[in-house]
Amino acid sequence: MSEPNQTAPTTAQTAAPSVAFITMGCAKNEVDSADMSAKLVDAGYRIEDDPEQADVVIVNTCSFIQAATEESIDAVLEASSYGNVASGKAKLVVAGCMPARYGADLESELAEASSFVPCSKEDDIVEVIDRMLAVSRDSFVEDSAASHRMAAPASAYVKISDGCDRFCAYCSIPYIRGRYHSFTADQIEADVADLVARGTREIVLIAQDTGRWGQDFDDPLTLAWLIDHLAKKFPATWFRVMYIQPTGVTDELIDAVAANDNVCDYFDVPFQHSNPTILAAMNRTGSAEEHLALIHRIRERIPNATIRTTLIAGFPGETDDQFEDLCSFVGECELDYIGVFAYSREEGTRAYRYDDQVDDDEKLERAQRLRDLADDVCTPRIAQRIGATMDVLVLGTEEDGQLYGRAQCQAPDVDGVTYVDAGTPGEFTTVRIDDTLMYEMEGSEVQ
């Protein structure tokens, strides 16, 4: 006999409940959503594209900075207003960074959610949904096995580690994701093999700190070894590495990138600032001179390498002179892409308690000035690609039918796209770059 107010497990064959994901934030969250989806499908659940038609809606949240937290809360509240959720027919789950960062406080504030799943508990998503729905998966009609083998996207992310040990003064990631731990080479290779078998042509390796991969093993390995191994194992697949801290860009890594044509000559190296005093306050190392030397070292070995960085404007204590130092660095650095962020004061981080917080209006003004300067530096470098011949991974079509894709010099979501006049989505095509507009390129197929 079931306990009062509990639903007895179903026994008749029924259609499996459907689960929809709304994913906020960075690519690492996209990977987490994909992993949870795979676990649910393996357990017999169905994945629904339309959250308003699902039996369970999972909002995988981001909470890296306050703006991301606010966007995630808005997404949760919007999901709670969907007819299926508002009527009680569907359950709402809040997963990811917000539950990890705010814990029980979040549960008391978001009564709309039926369950909260922090990052550390995402592996248990099947048990969470089972318990919440009080269903017997033995009764599911087995109609979802094929969906697990559905075509994968042409470009996909693979996480190679999680967590972070750097404790940069502005960053909440170590408190959300925990200490750094590398995923095994076998696990990473299996993830890559699965995606390649289902049609993925580009693998983007990501982590909070990719350059540290393998150093925490009993028998340490390196990121250089990993990408060389994967590139040779999957020679028809592009590999791209993101989020390499400056100390992780070793000569061994540069040589591994140079030695493999299917590894994108692309270095995403977050410098964050150029002034050594500000970098020390951030609990980071480096200087403008060291950053410029690293850029030179990369291009000395790979002359056409694409280099991206991110910078923070308005960190606590940043003086006018130190900001001018940063602007001077941007003017000298000859980088291809520069992402600029105004400092976000995050409760729980060391910098939250710093004196000399920069005024919000001043932070925004500095960030915009830096963005404008970055455009002045970077867009002429993009224009220098006119006349070059490049392979482009065709990704799809715009609403007007225009084909687009990305070259090796363009990372997903951040560097623009290449518009092409011919090609098949999911395949490579070789084009001549005919024109550029800011960060976008246009190319015509080489016959």
Image (cartoon, rainbow, N blue to C red):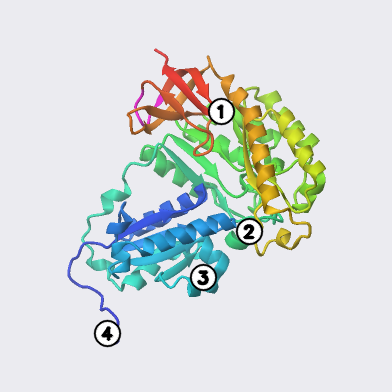
Q: Amino acid at mark 2?
A: Ser
Magenta residues, start to end: 423-428
| Above-or-below relation of 328 to 69 | above
- Measure how far apart labels 3 and 1 are at the Cα level: 47 Å
Q: Amino acid at mark 1?
A: Asn
- Measure how far apart labels 4 and 2 are at the Cα level: 44 Å
Upstream in sequence: badge 3 or badge 1: 3
Q: Quadrant of residue 402?
A: top left
- Measure how far apart labels 4 and 3 are at the Cα level: 31 Å
Q: Secondary structure at mark 3?
A: helix
Residue 2 shows which numbered tag?
4
x%, y% of residue 157?
Answer: 48, 44
Q: Amino acid at mark 3?
A: Leu
Residue 106 shows which numbered tag?
3
Q: Are marks 2 and 3 in contact (CB under 8 Å)?
A: no
Residue 260 shows which numbered tag?
1
- The one nearer the camera, 440 or 393, is 440
96 displayed left or right of 297: left
- The one nearer the camera, 444 or 440, is 440
Q: Quadrant of residue 81?
A: bottom left
- Mark nearest the camera among 1 and 4 is 4
In the picture, the quarter occupied by the C terminus is top left
x%, y% of residue 412?
Answer: 49, 38
Residue at left 37%, top 37%? 199
- Measure how far apart labels 1 and 4 are at the Cα level: 61 Å
- Mark nearest the camera among 2 and 3 is 3
Query: What residue sits right under mark 2 in the picture?
Result: 172
Q: Secondary structure at mark 4?
A: loop
- Mark nearest the camera among 4 and 2 is 2
Upstream in sequence: badge 4 or badge 2: 4
x%, y% of residue 331?
Answer: 72, 30
